[in-house]
Image (cartoon, helix red, strand yellow):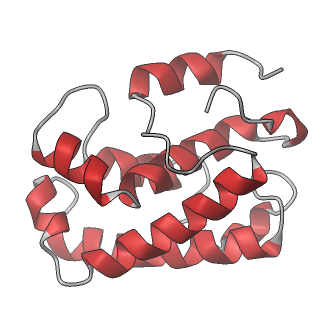
Amino acid sequence: MGGMPLNDMPWWRWRSNVRSALHMIGDPGFQRDVWQAGRDGYGDVTDAVYRLVEDTWLDNWSAEKYVGTIFRDSQEAALVDVAVLRVLKILHQVGADAPATAYLEHQAWPEAVQAAREAHVRLAAADEEDPDVPPKSLEVLAIFNRTVPT
């Protein structure tokens, strides 16, 4: 995410957190290689969900509220809303501190992954980034969020 042109978005740090979460939730290979393998540096599923909704409160209202600040248009917001609703439904069913397998084996997880992937691809394309580059670690995300993009 280091090269994304976020400086045109007023709340670019929030956008980067939402994108990071959508990226991880929307990538089954990442989930297998990192979350299921217990690899450090990326957080777990609950952490990704937290990044998705922590500052934005997307668990309380629509992403449409943030068009022009976090999201570029209503289409981005609509895709994010679908992903958030699908992921939160699973979170509420399995519990916030459930192991990764509880999420990944949930019957509705493939639909949540698909929705997150669609939102991630849309946001990445708008930010002129390749959506298939592996997700950044939380350390890299934190460094990125401390610096102003150029």
Q: Is residue 122 above or below residue 82?
A: above
Q: Name which residue lies at 57% across and 49% down.
A: 19
Is residue 72 visible in the rendered image? The answer is: yes
Q: Name which residue lies at 27% across and 68% down.
A: 91
Q: Nearer the viewer, residue 148 or 63?
A: 148
The C terminus sits in image quarter: top right
Q: Quadrant of residue 11?
A: top right
Q: Quadrant of residue 129?
A: top right
Q: Nearer the viewer, residue 137 or 3?
A: 3
Q: Position of residue 120 (x, y in %)?
A: 56, 59
Is 91 displayed left or right of 128 in the figure? left
Q: Name which residue lies at 70% across and 15% down.
A: 147
Q: Is residue 147 above or below residue 23?
A: above
The N terminus sits in image quarter: top right
Q: Position of residue 93 (x, y in %)?
A: 20, 77
Is 103 displayed left or right of 78 in the figure? left
Is residue 98 visible in the rendered image? The answer is: no
Is 96 displayed left or right of 101 in the figure? right
Q: Is residue 124 above or below residue 105?
A: above
